[in-house]
Image (tube, rainbow, N blue to C red):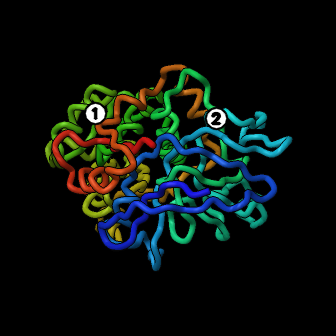
Amino acid sequence: MTHAAAVLTGKERFALTERTLSTPSTGEVVIEIRTVGVCGSDIHMFHDGRIGNISISEPLVLGHEFMGVVTHAPDGARDGDGQPLRPGNRVAVEPHVACGHCRECREGHPNLCTDHTFMGVFPRDGALQQKLIVPAHNCFVLPDGISDIGGAMLEPLGVALHALRLGHVTVGDRAAVVGAGPIGLLLVQLLRLAGVTALHVIEPLAWRRELAATTGATSVAAAFDTTEDSRYDVVFEAGWADDSVQTSALLARPGAKVVLVGIPGDDRCTVQHSLARRKGLSLIFSRRMAHTYPECIALVERGMVDVDKLVSDVFPLDQVQRAFERHARYEEGVVKVMVQL
């Protein structure tokens, strides 16, 4: 039986096609996709046909922030938190499929696995299609209190939570975030929960600055201010990893930590060596997430983090081209774009 899929067939070009579902292997379940988020990394692939050193050499289904409903699960299947999986369960899906055997996996860092696949990154198809086969242990059963959109937002929230943990934020710290896209805005909410006493956000888009101010930032600015900044204990770079890296280093006080979350378009990021060296900065590179879904579910279910507030646009699958164009052009008011199937 075939199902509809939005396939990236070339630079900035999608085609709606039919895909045939294969037979699930042992330990796999079939998901009927409901909601998919559009991520900045998707935009890299949409624009450039690549991300980092991974190039797309044939048509690919994007989409790694998603949730859906289980339609087939083998007897005894359990999700990543040990809960039984049954047809009808609403689940969020972690897109990173680690090997489970390498040193990095054994030491508890599956996000650093060197023998992995990632849904929506070549060569593994992602979730912009009606059905998808995924490992059971990559699923996490959603409570009724989390919406379908909220379920898809757990992936970017996991990225933000992993970055926060790498920053070792302590109560009373002064923190800054460079870039108020979805990851940056989620970091703002998490930093507020972590008990920082000052939270400065730099973001060039006015509507995103306003959203940062309403979700926890104590100050916002469009750019670095030499008369007021350079005093933060921990800085999170959550932009495009271009001049945002240098800005993050400028914001940091001597001895501070700078956590780099963004992905550069040309696979290069630049920071002035003398600035970082003389300040004695710790530069920490954050890759995806590790062991975050249960905690993210709890944060959203308890109302501690508002993920729905960040969603500015929702498109159907047959308007996926428009969804990506709106995000890629940073049109007025765009924050987080979702595709609902």
- On screen, residue 145 versus residue 74, left or right, reads left
The answer to whether residue 102 is above or below residue 292 is below
Percent x, y of residue 226 = 15, 49
Percent x, y of residue 330 = 21, 51
* Residue ID for mark 2: 294
- Residue drawn at 57 percent across, 40 percent down: 68
| Category of crowding for the residue at label 1, using alpha-carbon neighbours closer than 10 angstroms: few (below 14), some (14–19), many (at least 20) | many
Marks 1,2: beta carbons within 8 A: no
Q: Is residue 222 visible?
A: yes
- On screen, residue 89 versus residue 227, left or right, reads right
In the image, 214 versus 60, the foreground residue is 60
Please identify the residue farthest to the front as the structure is shown.
1
Screen quadrant of the C terminus: top left
Please identify the residue farthest to the bottom as the structure is shown.
57
- Residue drawn at 47 percent across, 54 percent down: 128
Percent x, y of residue 90 = 61, 34
Q: Earlier in the sequence, mark 1 or mark 2?
A: 1
In the image, 197 versus 300, the foreground residue is 300
- Residue drawn at 62 percent across, 62 percent down: 112
Residue type at mark 2: give it. Pro
Percent x, y of residue 25 = 77, 59
* Residue ID for mark 1: 212
The answer to whether residue 217 is above or below residue 269 is above
The answer to whether residue 6 is above or below residue 314 is below
- Residue drawn at 18 percent across, 48 percent down: 331
- On screen, residue 106 versus residue 257, left or right, reads right
Residue type at mark 1: give it. Ala
Considering the numbered disc 2 on the image, is that residue within a helix, a strand or a loop?
Answer: helix
Considering the numbered disc 1 on the image, is that residue within a helix, a strand or a loop?
Answer: helix
